[in-house]
Image (cartoon, rainbow, N blue to C red):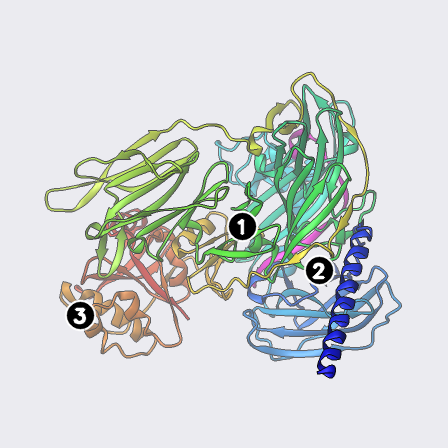
């Protein structure tokens, strides 16, 4: 018994000793000063590639491996012997190893890998000369991953694509872009060169210098008397390259004097798409964007407004927000965030990666953005920084940082960080649509096609919805409500969910039996959606031709019906929600059940103005600079600006929670549209993606970054030869077309008719082509599908439940199709062919080799 008693006493002593130690440690820890520090300086090297002595494609390092298909910023040409050249700008970092890998574009196949030697670690600029192996095929793209190790960082990854070929016109294409760009600064040279390449359009204004393009007037292209002075060199980035076509972006700065003679700095982005054909050069597309560099030390307030100047993105280039009491303001422009005290007129920097007075390529690299979340009466400013992190604790990473700035202390806390493995452009396509902090201190965002809620206090994360595509959700004008519909197809959408992010409450609208819902968006805070009957879905041979709606409904945030629109025999085929207007395209059902176009209609709704950035961002006309923008800081006639230059202090490690939201993988089809040197949009529809790319000479890739459409150089005319086949009845023409497509690739089509009779759609049957990718081109314009014929793939046009035609050729002004009923090739003028296929809703299918 004494032994037991002694053991109990010992255990109690141990318990109180440990508890006391924990309490003492907690008290001591609570008294420790919170450590804030200035943002760490940039420390990663930069790699620049060269081609024929021309520096190009500045590569910035990533400290973790990225998802290869979703990092697609540049392509570097190799010389005819597959030699890659460039150099490493060390910025004082000690390089310990340099290696590289060459992989397929999807990253799955390793072509070659080597560790390099023979370089001098003492040099500030280390030259690179890499002889790539003969395993590379001419005129085929590969992904190149350069890897550096330094004394401070074990693995740093740099990405570009590479291509080579003996017949490539790379130098000629690049030289033309340089000649054109230089000529815009030299009136005498410009008169001889520039006008012949323009395609002027009278509807394009020549007084807005923020954007000019190939359709602008000649005077606007040559700066319309602004007399810019080039400041520094042009940075070159090649974004697309084939043997005869190049897309390239020049980035540079110019100085332009105002009417008082004072020079201002402007950042210019100049894009070219140039083609070589038949010993001639053609300018296919051109665009020049210009943004005034905001210089806070020179900021002035006139009648309560502070001028930002020329902005290429218009109102969307700037954000502003004020606290509810109106005393504190914040505004973001040019990748920087500033605060403003309306009572004192004091302005100061809240966040920037740049170092004032330094021209460092690493801190000036603009692959990030700021989203201003809001200001509070207590002096707090919430904001997120997303994209590539130029410096600081996350340098070399891509992610989303949520910051809270405190006006009283002048310090900033990073509350959480979401790492990502995709490029800034892909991340922006997600996050640009939703970033909201609720009154309950929860942060809502869309990431990887999922909607998340993150509790800022606890770090708890909830996935609210997944597989939410861009065309299946909508956000209210004040960003406080988000709605999304279920189902991959419209006819499967039996529910619409509407989340109030302030209350956390989710309302649902459920379709009646045999009906479907189609989300159209918001007018203010009112939800707009359509209702259709599944029996009315327009189909032909299993291909959906349209989703007519018999009613349009409007509900408030409590899901109470505000209005319903319907008319007997009239159906709604398309809806566009434009601020406070709802524009409808309509169909009329005839006595035999067919639907034909009918006059459109418009509904107008009154909405309350919200506290959005648009209310603070103003536009005006300037006699010299055309359209300019400003931020309304003060009621007219009140105090101006006193700029206080200071470098803020940050705390990232102690409070910051690392939140993992997974990757961007999804089973749903996704098409990435690249135009004018950047990602334009991501679409679930291939025809929609092609439409976005067509006018801007763009490229469409699938989620594995395989090309599915490209407005590249195609032959001026082409007609495919089909295998011989007997004529068939009209009822068998669809099957005959698919059999011919299979026969073109040497495959058996014996089961085509059986599969169609069992209810398989033409897409499903055509997907039996082994080793080929079937593409659904439903809704694509006739001119868009010629790309596939140029590649050697016939295009099926579904014209009925059992009927079809095969498009097999084109010339400049005509199209040829094969009619399996007559067994003849039929050539039609382009306009007549467009009218023919539009009657069947352009229901096209094809395949890629």
Q: Nearer the viewer, residue 525 or 707?
A: 525
Residue 456: % across, % down: 61, 50
Q: Indicate which disc residue 127 carries.
A: none
* Snapshot quadrant of residue 397: bottom right
Whether residue 258 appears in magenta in the rendering, the answer is no
x 78%, y 63%: residue: 20
Query: Which residue corresponds to mark 2?
Result: 396
Please state which of the two labelled residues, at mark 1 or mark 3, is closer to the viewer.
1
Q: Nearer the viewer, residue 838 or 660?
A: 660
Q: Residue furthest front?
A: 1
Left or right placement of residue 535 versus residue 552 in this view: left
Q: Label 3, label 2: how many angstroms apart (C-alpha)?
A: 56 Å
Give how far across and how far down residue 553 sits, in percent.
Answer: 30, 38
Disc number placed over residue 445 in the picture, else none: 1
The residue at the far left in this view is 591
Q: Earlier in the sequence, mark 2 or mark 1?
A: 2
Q: Which residues are magenta?
A: 223-243
């Amino acid at each position: 018994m004494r032994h037991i008693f002694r053991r109990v006493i010992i255990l109690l002593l141990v318990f109180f000793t440990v508890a006391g130690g924990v309490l003492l440690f907690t008290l001591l820890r609570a008294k420790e000063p919170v450590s804030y520090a200035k943002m760490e300086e940039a420390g990663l090297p930069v790699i620049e590639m060269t081609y024929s002595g021309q520096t190009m494609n500045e590569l910035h390092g990533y400290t973790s491996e990225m998802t290869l298909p979703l990092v697609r910023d540049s392509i570097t040409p190799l010389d005819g012997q597959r030699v890659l050249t460039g150099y490493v700008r060390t910025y004082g970092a000690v390089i310990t190893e340099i290696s590289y890998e060459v992989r397929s574009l999807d990253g799955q196949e390793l072509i070659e890998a080597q560790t390099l030697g023979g370089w001098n670690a003492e040099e500030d600029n280390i030259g690179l000369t890499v002889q790539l192996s003969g395993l590379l095929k001419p005129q085929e793209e590969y992904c190149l991953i350069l890897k550096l190790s330094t004394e401070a960082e074990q693995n740093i990854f740099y990405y570009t694509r590479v291509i080579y070929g003996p017949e490539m016109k790379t130098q000629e294409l690049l030289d033309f872009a340089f000649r054109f760009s230089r000529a815009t600064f030299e009136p005498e040279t410009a008169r001889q060169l520039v006008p012949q390449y323009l395609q002027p359009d009278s509807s394009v204004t020549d007084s807005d210098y923020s954007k000019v393009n190939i359709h602008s007037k000649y005077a606007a292209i040559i700066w319309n008397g602004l007399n810019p002075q080039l400041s520094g060199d042009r940075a070159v980035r090649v974004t697309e390259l084939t043997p005869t076509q190049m897309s390239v972006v020049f980035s540079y700065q110019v100085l332009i004097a105002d009417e008082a003679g004072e020079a201002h700095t402007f950042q210019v982005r100049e894009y070219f798409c140039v083609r070589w054909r038949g010993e001639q050069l053609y300018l296919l597309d051109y665009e020049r964007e210009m943004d005034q560099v905001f210089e806070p030390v020179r900021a002035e307030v006139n009648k309560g407004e502070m001028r930002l100047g020329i902005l290429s993105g218009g109102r969307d280039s700037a954000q502003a927000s004020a606290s509810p009491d109106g005393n504190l303001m914040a505004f973001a422009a040019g990748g920087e965030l500033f605060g403003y005290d309306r009572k004192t007129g004091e302005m100061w920097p809240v966040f920037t990666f740049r170092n004032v007075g330094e021209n460092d390529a690493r801190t000036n690299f603009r692959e990030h953005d700021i989203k201003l979340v809001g200001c509070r009466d207590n002096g707090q400013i919430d904001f997120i920084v997303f994209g590539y992190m130029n410096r600081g604790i996350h340098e070399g990473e891509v992610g989303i940082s949520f910051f809270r700035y405190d006006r009283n202390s002048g310090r900033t806390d990073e509350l959480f960080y979401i790492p990502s493995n995709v490029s800034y452009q892909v991340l922006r396509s997600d996050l640009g649509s939703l970033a909201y902090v609720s009154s309950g201190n929860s942060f809502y965002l869309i990431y990887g096609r999922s909607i998340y809620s993150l509790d800022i206090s606890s770090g708890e994360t909830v996935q609210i919805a997944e597989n939410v595509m861009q065309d299946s959700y909508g956000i209210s004008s004040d960003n406080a409500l988000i709605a999304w519909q279920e189902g991959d197809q419209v006819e499967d959408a039996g529910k619409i969910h509407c989340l109030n992010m302030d209350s956390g409450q989710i309302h649902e609208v459920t379709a009646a039996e045999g009906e479907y819902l189609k989300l159209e968006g918001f007018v203010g805070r009112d939800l707009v959606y359509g209702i259709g009957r599944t029996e009315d879905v327009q189909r032909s041979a299993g291909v959906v031709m349209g989703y007519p709606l018999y009613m349009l409904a409007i509900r408030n945030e409590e899901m109470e019906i505000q209005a319903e629109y319907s008319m007997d025999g009239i159906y709604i085929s398309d809806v566009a929600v434009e601020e406070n207007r709802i524009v409808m395209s309509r169909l009329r059902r005839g006595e035999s059940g067919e639907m034909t176009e009918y006059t459109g209609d418009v509904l107008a709704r009154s909405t309350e103005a919200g506290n959005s950035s648009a209310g603070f961002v103003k536009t005006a006309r300037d006699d010299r600079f055309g359209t300019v923008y400003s931020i309304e800081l003060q009621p007219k006639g009140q105090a101006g600006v006193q700029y206080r230059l200071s470098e803020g202090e940050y705390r990232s490690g102690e409070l910051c929670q690392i939140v993992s939201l997974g990757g961007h993988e999804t089973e749903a089809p996704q098409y990435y549209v690249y135009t004018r040197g950047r990602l334009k949009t991501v679409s679930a529809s291939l025809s929609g993606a092609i439409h976005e790319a067509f006018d801007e000479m763009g490229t469409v890739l699938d989620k594995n970054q395989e090309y599915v459409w490209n407005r590249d150089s195609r032959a001026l005319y082409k007609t495919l030869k089909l295998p011989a086949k007997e004529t068939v009845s009209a009822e068998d023409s669809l099957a005959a077309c698919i059999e011919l497509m299979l026969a073109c690739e040497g495959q058996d089509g014996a089961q085509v008719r059986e599969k169609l009779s069992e209810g398989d759609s033409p897409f499903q049957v055509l997907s039996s082509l082994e080793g080929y990718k079937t593409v659904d081109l439903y809704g694509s314009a006739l001119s868009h599908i010629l790309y596939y014929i140029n590649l050697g793939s016939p295009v099926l046009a579904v014209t009925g439940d059992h009927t079809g035609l095969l498009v097999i050729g084109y010339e400049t002004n005509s199209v040829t199709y094969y009619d399996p009923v007559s067994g003849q090739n039929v050539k039609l003028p382009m306009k007549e062919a467009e009218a023919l296929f539009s009657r069947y809703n352009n229901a096209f299918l094809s395949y890629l080799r």
